[in-house]
Amino acid sequence: MNAYIAVFLVAGACFGLGTFSSRHLFSEGPQRIDDSMQTSSLAGRVFWTMVCTFLWPIMIITGVNTAWVLAKRKRKFLQKP
């Protein structure tokens, strides 16, 4: 059982480190990077990694939702005459 927990936490930490630069896409909706709160790079990276370590399955779901919303918005924009 401990191996499963360790793999879950390591996967979450890797997800957090890998998605730090696009963390605005994993919020409650697509926001511009400029609108998000800016912190120091190290503090922001540590906080994002800690959040993703425990919540990475939820973050993946919100990322998929944001990608779907952005794709729908792009289709709507491209269909305008």
Image (cartoon, rainbow, N blue to C red):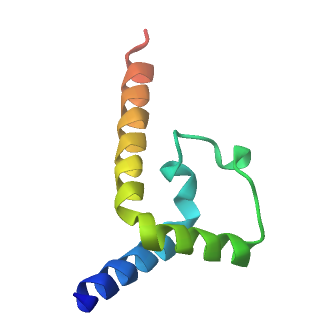
Left or right: 9 with respect to 42? Answer: left
Left or right: 39 with respect to 54? Answer: right
Outermost residue to the top: 81
Question: What residue appears at the point 24 percent right and 84 percent down from the top-left corner?
Answer: 4
Left or right: 30 with respect to 42? Answer: left
Residue 38 x %, y %: 76, 58
Residue 51 x %, y %: 53, 67
Q: Quadrant of the N terminus?
A: bottom left
State which quadrant residue 13 falls in: bottom left
Residue 54 x %, y %: 44, 70
Residue 31 or residue 12, whichever sits in front: 12
State which quadrant residue 21 falls in: bottom right
Residue 68 position (above or below residue 19): above
Residue 76 position (above or below residue 27): above
Question: What residue appears at the point 55 percent right and 58 percent down from the top-left corner?
Answer: 23
Residue 2 position (above or below residue 60): below
Question: What residue appears at the point 60 percent right and 41 percent down from the top-left corner?
Answer: 31
Question: What residue appears at the point 42 percent right and 79 percent down from the top-left corner?
Answer: 14
Outermost residue to the bottom: 3
Residue 49 position (above or below residue 26): below
Q: Quadrant of the C terminus?
A: top left
Residue 73 x %, y %: 43, 27
The total number of labels drawn is 0
